[in-house]
Amino acid sequence: MKKMELDAALNQFLKDEDAEEYFWPDQMAGNRTIFDYSDIVGKEISFTPEENMSADWFWSKAHVQPAPANNQYDIDFRGICNFVFAHVERELFTTLDAIFFVFNEEGLDEVFDYTGDEYALECIDMDEHIGLMWYEKNIIIINVGLIQASSEELADEFSSAASHASDGIVMTIVHELRHLMLETNVLLPEEKYPDYEATEAAVEEYTRQFADRWLLGNIDFVSKV
Ligand SMILES: [Zn+2]
């Protein structure tokens, strides 16, 4: 949302819903934060207008766990974030608080440090899920370790594990950002973003369309060490 549209929608939301605005002293001018009590558990949401977004801004939201010593791949996380930022609609980032790239359980320690919430340590099943959108915190987590492992199973003579991992990380970010936008941005108009868009099947379809359009197997941000 552009700043004017965001302000209008947020002011209306404060009037209509059980919510109040909170003023962070060090918040970027134009950003706004609310506590929304209309949900079962009250939650904080910060909104960033499009004008305040940039590739550097998105990168400033990224937390990357250092790769384990024996990791087989070299990953250009900055390049990945720049690529995603350049190819998706700005709306996907409006409520984003942080994005974490983790290789294993230890990576969740930083999510815990950042949120101060012990649930961070069990919010994602690292053996099962390649990504997660943590609704209460407006955070997305990308399980790089599992994406690498599944990419090795997908590799064949046409496409390497590194190439699959590169596409997999990009697609997981797009997928989780789409969940984030549809589920946490309470200001979005229902007519433009109807509820069915938030179903898993619809989010997968959105991600598939992104991949068909932008990932043609020739952009690699991952290389074998
Ligand atoms: Zn999903």
Image (spheres, rainbow, N blue to C red):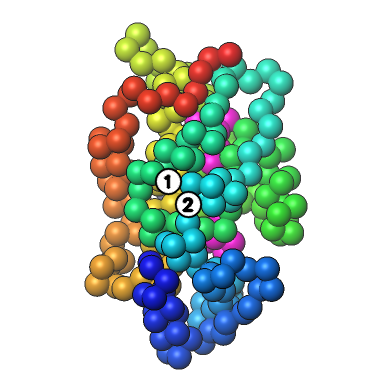
Mark 2: amino acid: Ser
Near-viewer residue (45 or 57): 57
Q: Which residue is mark 1?
A: 85
Residues at discs 2 and 1 in contact (Cβ within 8 Å) = yes
Label 2 SS: loop
Q: Is residue 13 depicted above or below 106 in this figure?
A: below
Q: Is residue 88 depicted above or below 36 in this figure?
A: above
Q: Position of residue 147 (x, y in %)?
A: 50, 30
Q: Position of residue 176 (x, y in %)?
A: 45, 49
Mark 2 or mark 1: which comes first in sequence? 2
Residue 141, can we see it?
no
Q: Is residue 22 depicted above or below 45 in this figure?
A: below
Q: Which residue is mark 2?
A: 54
Label 1 SS: helix
The answer to which quarter of the image holds residue 213 is top left
Relative to 162, is 34 on the left or the right? right
Q: Is residue 168 depicted above or below 180 in this figure?
A: above
Residue at horizontal 30 percent and vertical 35 percent from the top: 214
Indicate whether residue 137 is drawn in magenta: yes
Q: Position of residue 223 (x, y in %)?
A: 51, 18
Near-viewer residue (4 or 106): 4
The answer to which quarter of the image holds residue 204 is top left
Relative to 136, is 193 on the left or the right? left
Residue span colored magenta: 134-147
Q: Position of residue 189 (x, y in %)?
A: 31, 73
Residue 191, can we see it?
yes
The answer to which quarter of the image holds residue 193 is bottom left
Kindly give the residue lying farthest to the bottom in the view shown: 15
Residue at horizontal 63 percent and vertical 78 percent from the top: 23
Residue at horizontal 54 percent and vertical 47 percent from the top: 56
Question: In which quadrant of the rendered image does the C terminus lie?
Answer: top right
